[in-house]
Image (cartoon, rainbow, N blue to C red):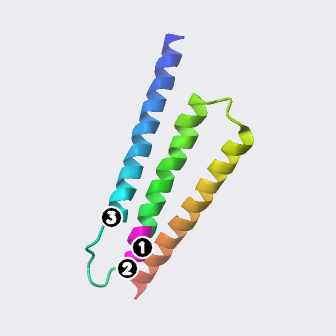
């Protein structure tokens, strides 16, 4: 029983650290003001948004689902699917800008 609590706590701490790291990294990317002359600025914004949303998604899936198991399932599913959709769109935009930058 003690080992199970330790493992659950360690998973929560790792998930929390991982999500906070992604949110801070994405926030730092969103605040970048000086870029090389031919570097596409929207790519930095898209990748920063992707990192922030990925951090929120990881927090929802790893930490919040374990801390609040009796949360309303429809609201949880809606929030997680919305975050996954925004993450997919922002990663797609990042890849599109990266391809444009590399191919031009």
- The quarter of the picture where residue 32 lies is bottom left
Residue where numbered disc 1 is placed:
43
Please report the bounds of the magenta region as a residue range.
Answer: 41-45
Residue 81 x, y percent position in the rendering: 66, 53
Asked whether the beta carbons under mark 2 and mark 1 sit within 8 Å of each other, the answer is yes
Residue 38 x, y percent position in the rendering: 31, 84
Q: Quadrant of the C terminus?
A: bottom left
Identify whether 66 is placed above or below 32: above
**C-alpha distance separating marks 2 and 1:** 6 Å
Residue 14 x, y percent position in the rendering: 42, 35
Identify whether 104 is placed above or below 35: below
**C-alpha distance separating marks 3 and 2:** 15 Å
- Please tell me whether mark 3 sits on a helix, a strand or a loop: loop
> Which residue shows up at 47% across the image and 24% down it?
9
- Please tell me whether mark 1 sits on a helix, a strand or a loop: helix
Mark carried by residue 40: 2
- Residues 71 and 1: in front is 71
Is tag 3's residue or tag 1's residue first in the polypeptide sequence?
A: 3
- Please tell me whether mark 2 sits on a helix, a strand or a loop: loop
Depth check, mark 3 against mark 2: the one in front is 3
> Which residue shows up at 56% across the image and 42% down it?
60
- Prevailing secondary structure of the magenta residues: helix
**C-alpha distance separating marks 3 and 1:** 13 Å
Residue 64 x, y percent position in the rendering: 56, 36
Mark carried by residue 31: 3
Identify whether 77 is placed above or below 6: below
> Which residue shows up at 54% across the image and 48% down it?
57
């Amino acid at each position: 029983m003690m080992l199970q609590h330790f493992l659950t706590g360690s998973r929560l701490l790792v998930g929390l650290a991982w999500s906070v790291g992604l949110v801070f990294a994405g926030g730092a990317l969103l605040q970048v003001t000086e870029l090389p002359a031919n570097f596409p600025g929207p790519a930095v914004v898209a990748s920063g948004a992707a990192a922030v949303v990925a951090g929120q998604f990881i927090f929802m899936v790893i930490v919040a689902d374990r801390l609040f198991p009796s949360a309303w399932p429809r609201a949880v599913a809606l929030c997680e699917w919305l975050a996954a959709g925004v993450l997919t769109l922002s990663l797609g935009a990042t890849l599109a800008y990266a391809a444009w930058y590399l191919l031009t």
